[in-house]
Amino acid sequence: MHGINLQMLLYLFTLEEHWKKQGEKAIPAGVLYLPVLENYINTQREDLPEETRKKREKQWTMSGLLLEQEESLRGMEQNLEGLFIPVWKNKDGSYSAYSSIASYEQMGQLSQKIEELIVSMAENLAEGKIPAYPIDTAQYPTCDYCEYRKVCGYETGDPVREISKKDRRTILKELEEQNNV
């Protein structure tokens, strides 16, 4: 929604568009982020090997956003227990509220939003509008990890973009409302 963390979704929707232009039917199944570093797990001497294995497997669960399409999801994880993909089925067969899924329509709205953001970024660059207006959140503290902090011109006390973290459902609802206006 704020133009950050777009890379994988941009790739996904670009590939979809490419195949459509080739006359092929392309449906975005989603994007997944695989944890690359294995963290240490806390175990006790009396822990059973099965308990230790379950703790380690929790680290392998990917994050991301997937198309709410049963066949596709089961192709990634047969029993949909959230072991590898962020999708869980309830006992009644519905998807858990914690599942990271979106309908085909919602994926389209997300694609449209990303296209708008990219076009806006390109227009600003073309017009030379490149202000030092960094993001300030708990996840992205202003300038802490920026490689360009010495050349961008930002100084402590200058305005920052304060963005709040939103969950998937809130973002998808906002996209729907924007498209219905």
Image (cartoon, grey):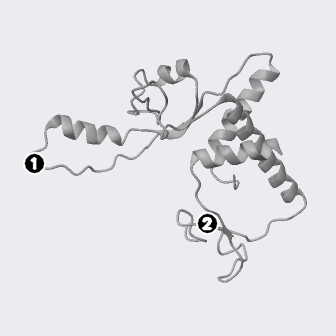
Helix, strand or loop status at disc 2: loop
Residue 86 image point, x, y percent: 47, 36
Residue that mark 1 sits on: 45
Task: Tell whether label 2 touches label 1 (CB within 8 Å).
Answer: no
Q: In this rendering, would 82 be left or right of 110?
A: left
Extreme residue toward the right, this view: 127
Which SS class for mark 1?
loop
Q: Please tell me which residue is depicted at 26% across the width and 37% down the height of the picture.
A: 54
Q: Nearer the viewer, residue 4 or 80?
A: 80
What percent of the width, then of the height, locates residue 46?
A: 9, 45
Along the horizontal axis of the image, is 133 left or right of 38? Answer: right
Pointer 1: residues within 10 angstroms few (<14), some, or many (20+)?
Answer: few
Amino acid tagged 1: Arg
Mark 2 = which residue? 147
Q: Is residue 37 left or right of residue 103?
A: left
**Front label number (1 vs 2):** 1
Q: Residue furthest left?
A: 46
Amino acid marked by disc 2: Glu
Residue at 71 percent across and 77 percent down: it is: 159
Q: Residue at x 67, y 83 (%)?
A: 157
In the rendered image, residue 141, in percent from the top left (x then y), is placed at 56, 69
Q: Depth check: give the residue in front, 118 or 50.
A: 50
